[in-house]
Image (cartoon, rainbow, N blue to C red):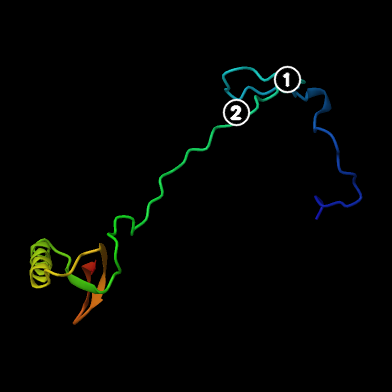
Amino acid sequence: MDNLNSNKPVPSGPANPGKANVSNSPLDLGGSRPVEVNTVPKPQPKPVAVPAIKMPVTSSVQSVPTGKITGVKTLYTKLHAGSLDFLDGLINDWIKENPTKEIKLVQTTIGEIQGKKTEPNIIVTIWY
């Protein structure tokens, strides 16, 4: 308890006032040029207005022939190498069985279909 004496003042300066070795020069942080003190910032150039570019309008029904969509046929198969040939056969058979139907739009997606077990499938939707 001899080290803890609350009656002694706490020193506010360096422990050895005559040996303080403090530099007031700017630090070198490894930059490409020295930092200048008290410099006026240079004005930034004003941004130049760029004319607006018109983007083409795209739509999933842009290439649809005139006429109403009267029905939809959805075909799907498991997602593996041999299934694409099977899906091609399904699509070709459906087209041969329905020669009077005009195909207006075809969409494809990949999703999970639940059967005995849930597996990823490729799904083709034919709008006619």
> How many marks overall?
2
The residue lying at 62 percent from left, 29 percent from top is 47
Q: Is residue 13 above or below residue 117?
A: above
The residue lying at 22 percent from left, 72 percent from top is 74
Q: Where residue 10 appears, x then y in whole percent?
A: 86, 43
Residue at mark 2 to residue at mark 1: CA–CA distance: 40 Å
**Residue 6 or 31: which is nearer the viewer?**
31
Q: Is residue 60 above or below residue 28?
A: below
Q: Of helix, strand and loop, which one carries label 1? A: loop
**Residue 29 or 37: which is nearer the viewer?**
37
Q: Three-letter amino acid code at disc 1?
A: Ser
According to the image, label 1 marks what residue? 25
Choose mark 2 or mark 1, whichever is in front. Answer: 2
- Image side of residue 114 versus residue 27, left or right: left
The tag on residue 48 is: 2
- Image side of residue 7 versus residue 95, left or right: right
Q: Three-letter amino acid code at disc 2?
A: Val
Circle 2 residues within 10 Å: few <14, some 14–19, many ≥20: few
The residue lying at 17 percent from left, 65 percent from top is 79
Picture quarter with the C terminus: bottom left
